[in-house]
């Protein structure tokens, strides 16, 4: 679900890849399995699963800010961004998919 929240174009591309694999071979490639693990890791980071999703709005805003769609990560609730969640999101977002 995280992909659809902030990386819609990439999610559509990934869905197309999955459909192609299912149509052509039916076997999941090592590449898709690796991508699945990376996506799960990123979703956990920006949905802030480690803090019971308390910082998910700030996490999603950070991804959208990096894409140039938001000017900042302001939240309605002060302290919505949990300690460590911004650092974890940055680590996760650096290598993939943006």
Image (cartoon, rainbow, N blue to C red):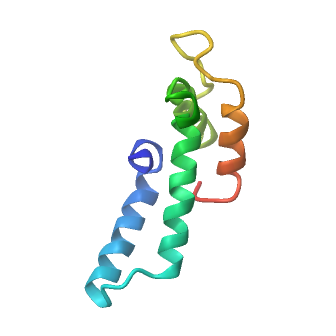
Question: What residue appears at the point 59 percent right and 54 percent down from the top-left corner?
Answer: 98
In percent of width and height, residue 71 lies at 61, 27
> In this image, 45 relative to 86: left or right?
left
- Residue at image coords 55%, 16%: 75
| Residue at the extreme bottom | 25
The image quadrant that residue 13 belongs to is bottom left
- The single residue placed furthest to the left in the displayed view is 23
Q: Position of residue 92 (x, y in %)?
A: 66, 50
Q: Is residue 69 visible?
A: no
Q: Is residue 78 left or right of residue 88?
A: left
Q: In this orientation, does residue 89 appear?
A: yes
Up-down: is 56 above or below 35?
above
Q: Is residue 53 above or below residue 36?
A: above
Q: Position of residue 21 (x, y in %)?
A: 35, 82
The residue shown at (62%, 22%) is 81
Residue toward you, 67 or 63: 63
Q: Position of residue 23 (x, y in %)?
A: 26, 84
Q: Is residue 29 left or right of residue 67?
A: left
What residue is at 56 percent from the left and 39 percent from the top? Answer: 46
Q: Nearer the viewer, residue 19 or 26?
A: 26
> How many numbered circles does the render carry?
0
Q: Is residue 53 above or below residue 13?
A: above
């Amino acid at each position: 679900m995280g992909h659809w929240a902030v990386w819609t174009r990439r999610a559509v591309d990934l869905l197309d890849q999955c459909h192609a694999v299912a149509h052509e071979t039916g076997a999941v490639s090592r590449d898709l399995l690796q991508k699945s693990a990376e996506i799960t890791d990123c979703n956990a980071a920006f949905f802030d699963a480690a803090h019971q999703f308390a910082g998910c709005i700030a996490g999603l805003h950070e991804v959208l800010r990096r894409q140039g769609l938001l000017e900042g990560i302001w939240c309605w609730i002060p302290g919505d961004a949990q300690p460590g969640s911004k650092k974890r999101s940055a680590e996760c977002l650096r290598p993939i998919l943006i």
